[in-house]
Structures are given as structure tokens and as C-alpha cells.
Image (cartoon, rainbow, N blue to C red):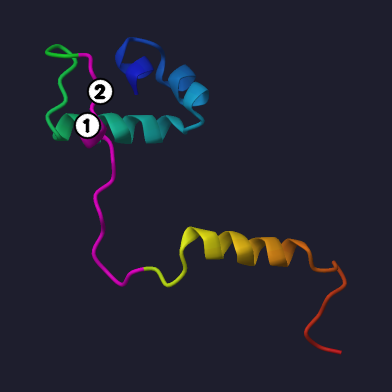
Amino acid sequence: MALAEAGIEKKIAAASAGMTVSSVYRVIKKAKAREYNKDESSIMKMEYVVDESRSGRPRKANAEKEVEVLDAGANLSPHFTLFH
């Protein structure tokens, strides 16, 4: 976002950040809605861009459990089947 706000093309800023161009625009829009103003200060505070917690049911699995499950699946034989 700092690159995009510094005048670098959004497409180049997105590629260097590993984001899509639409994501760059969305982050800039969110930051401006949270009172970011590049004319007042070029400092990008995390509160301008960090997602807020969402309502709804909490996740059952934590990140460690998800990695464990994915690793276990990656180690299966490509010919593995539940049915014989």
C-alpha cells in the first residue's frame, strides 16, 4: 500500500506485495475509511489495514491442527481409497 500511495503504479505495487490489484484498491479504501491521510502523514499504522475480528462461530481447528491434517493428506499414497 505504501508503494501505491507513493505514486507507484497499482499493478507494480500489487505484484511486489504478492497481491491482486483489486486487493490493493480494497486495502487503500479501508485505510482511508479508518482516517489514513497520506497528506498528513506517510506513516502506515497497522490499525489502518488489519482486519477486525468477525462475528460468528469460532473455528474448531487452530492453524497447527490444519497443518497437521494437510501434511497427513500429502503423505497418502496417490492410489489410496476408502473403498475396496
Amino acid type of the residue that numbered disc 1 sits on in the rendered structure: Ala
Quarter occupied by residue 24: top left
- From the viewer's perspective, is the residue at label 2 or at label 1 nearer? 2
Magenta span includes 55: yes
Whole-percent x, y for residue 80 in the image: 83, 75
SS at circle 1: helix
- Name the residue tied to disc 2: 44
Whole-percent x, y for residue 49 in the image: 27, 35
- Name the residue tied to disc 1: 31
> Do callouts 2 and 1 mark residues in contact (Cβ within 8 Å)?
yes
Which residue is outermost to the front?
64
At horizontal 21% and vertical 36% (from top left) the residue drawn is: 47
At horizontal 25% and vertical 55% (from top left) the residue drawn is: 53
Whole-percent x, y for residue 9 in the image: 41, 14
The answer for how far apart the CA atoms under marks 2 and 1 are is: 9 Å
Viewer-nearest residue: 44 or 25: 44
Is 63 above or below relative to 41? below
Q: Which region is colored magenta?
A: 42-58
Quarter occupied by residue 84: bottom right
- Residue 5's disc is none
Amino acid type of the residue that numbered disc 2 sits on in the rendered structure: Met
